[in-house]
Every structure is written in C-alpha cells, then in structure tokens.
Image (tube, rainbow, N blue to C red):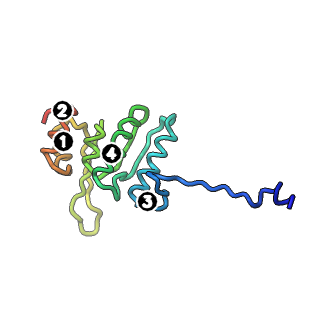
Amino acid sequence: MSAWLYGTDHIQTAYGIQYDGTDVERLSPGTRGIVLLLLYLVIDTDDDRPLIIDQPEENLDPRSIFVELVERFRSAKQRRQIIIVTHNANLIVNTDADQVIVATCGPHRPGQLPEIRYQAGGLEDLAIRECVCNILEGGEEAFKERAKRLRVGF
C-alpha cells in the first residue's frame, strides 16, 4: 500500500487542445488547420523570421477565412513577413497584401512541361488588380467594395 501511495506509476498526465469546446482531433481538417495556425501565431509572437503558409484556406468556407484568419494575418505582418500561397483572392484583398505574385500556367506542350508565367506587383497596379478580380469571388464589384477600404482607385 505504501508503494502505491508514494509511487507515481498510477499517475498519468494528459493534455489536449480544444477549440470552441471540441477536441482538436474531432475538428474538420480545415478547422484543425486554423487552430494549429492560430496556435503557432500566438506562440511565436517574438519570432520575426518570414512565415510561409501554403493554402491556409484549404477546406474552409469564406466566412471562416475572413473571421478567423484575416485579422490575425494583418496583425502578424506588422512584425514579420508573411508569405501566403493561395488560390483565394479574397484572402489577398482582405489582408491588404503588399505584394501579389500571380502565377499562370500555359497549355500543356507535348513532351514538355507547361510554361508558367509570373506577374508581380501591388494591388495598386492595374494589371495585378485585373488578375485578382478575375479570380476574386464576386469579381470586379467585390474588389470595388474592398478598394474603398484600401483607398485604391479602380
């Protein structure tokens, strides 16, 4: 009896992460990605190295992207460079991206890889805005609404 009382073999430590009262293991892949990304951004507040994030919008609805990620990216970019690889133009516009690189894949060429072209600039650049509007859900009208906040003419 005294061995059990003074021993530690019967004691177990358990931990878990919950988001809105749900264990992270039970969340959808998209929500799990948000939680882990938010956790990383909170833990590394002193880190000023560039952060590369590949498709944070994957498996997420547009509202979750806006509510959960946009403000956090805006805040994080005040202290470090954030590089986001995304197919979501709403994320680019709403986070007030400083630099946009649009990659365009050409047609398949027999026996060769397709040609990939890049176009870079800020949202102030008309050519970049047109590219973003072609991808943006809601198109040009959606960009015009956001342009008011960005103080960018269109």
What quarter of the picture does the C terminus occupy? top left
Q: Position of residue 41 (x, y in %)?
A: 46, 42
Q: Mark 3 or 2, which is nearer the eye?
A: 3
Q: CA distance from mark 3 to mark 1?
A: 35 Å
Q: Which residue is mark 2?
A: 152
Q: Which residue is mark 3?
A: 27
Comes first in the chain, label 3 or label 1: 3
Q: Mark 3 or 1, which is nearer the eye?
A: 3
Q: Residue at x 28, y 42 (%)?
A: 100
Q: CA distance from mark 1 to mark 4?
A: 23 Å
Residue sitting nearer the eye, 149 or 116: 149
What quarter of the picture does the N terminus occupy? bottom right
Q: CA distance from mark 2 to mark 1?
A: 10 Å
Residue type, numbered disc 4: Val
Residue type, numbered disc 1: Arg
Q: Which residue is mark 4?
A: 67
The reply to whether the C-beta atoms of the residues labelled 2 and 1 are less than 8 Å apart is: yes
Q: Is residue 21 above or below residue 78?
A: below
SS assignment at label 4: helix
Count neighbours of disc 3 (C-alpha within 10 A) and say few if under 14, some if 14 to 19, many if 20 or more: some
Residue sitting nearer the eye, 95 or 15: 15
Q: Which residue is mark 1?
A: 129
SS assignment at label 2: loop
